[in-house]
Image: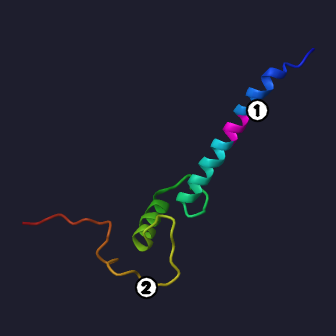
Amino acid sequence: MPVPWEALLPFGLVTVMFGAAGTLLNASTRGQNQGKPARYNIDNWDDMMMRRDERLTGHKRGQRDDPQPPAGFETSSIWYTERTT
């Protein structure tokens, strides 16, 4: 049975394009997460810690090693108060 050589060129192009798209998507995702892989199965605790880290460092994947919070951390709480008149 002869091999249809004319079909190998489009097959190669499609394979290369899917590979390039997947590689670029992975690089974009890691670039947005500061070089760390994406997070899956995030529960309420993880979500709360990510919001706290974002308030501390300015990025949801950032973490700090010094125990001193930045200026203005006391007033950047996620709890909002209601107005009493």
* Residue 39 on image: x %, y %: 56, 56
Q: Confirm whether the magenta stretch covers residue 17.
A: yes
* Displayed quadrant of residue 72: bottom left
Q: Quadrant of residue 44?
A: bottom left
For numbered disc 1, what is the local secondary structure? helix
Q: In this view, does 40 lie to the left or right of 69?
A: right
Residue at the outermost top position: 1
Q: What residue type is labelled 2?
A: Gln
Location of mark 1 (residue) = 12
Q: Is residue 22 above or below residue 45?
A: above
67 horizontally vs 15: left or right: left
Between residues 49 and 20, which one lies in front from this camera angle?
Answer: 20
Which residue corresponds to the image point at 47% horizontal and 62% vertical from the top-left? Answer: 45
Pointer 2 residue: 68
Describe the element under mark 2 as helix, strand or loop: loop
Which residue is located at x 47 percent, y 84 percent?
67
Residue depicted at 29% across the width and 66% down the height:
79
Residue 62 relative to residue 5: left or right: left
Residue at the farthest left position: 85
Of the pair 48 and 4, the residue shown nearer to us: 4
Tell which tag, 1 or 2, sits nearer the viewer: 1
Q: Position of residue 42 (x, y in %)?
A: 52, 55
Viewer-nearest residue: 43 or 39: 39
Dot 1 or dot 2: first in sequence order is 1
User: Which residue is at the far right?
Assistant: 1
The type of residue carrying mark 1 is Gly
Instruction: Please give the range of residues in magenta.
Output: 15-19
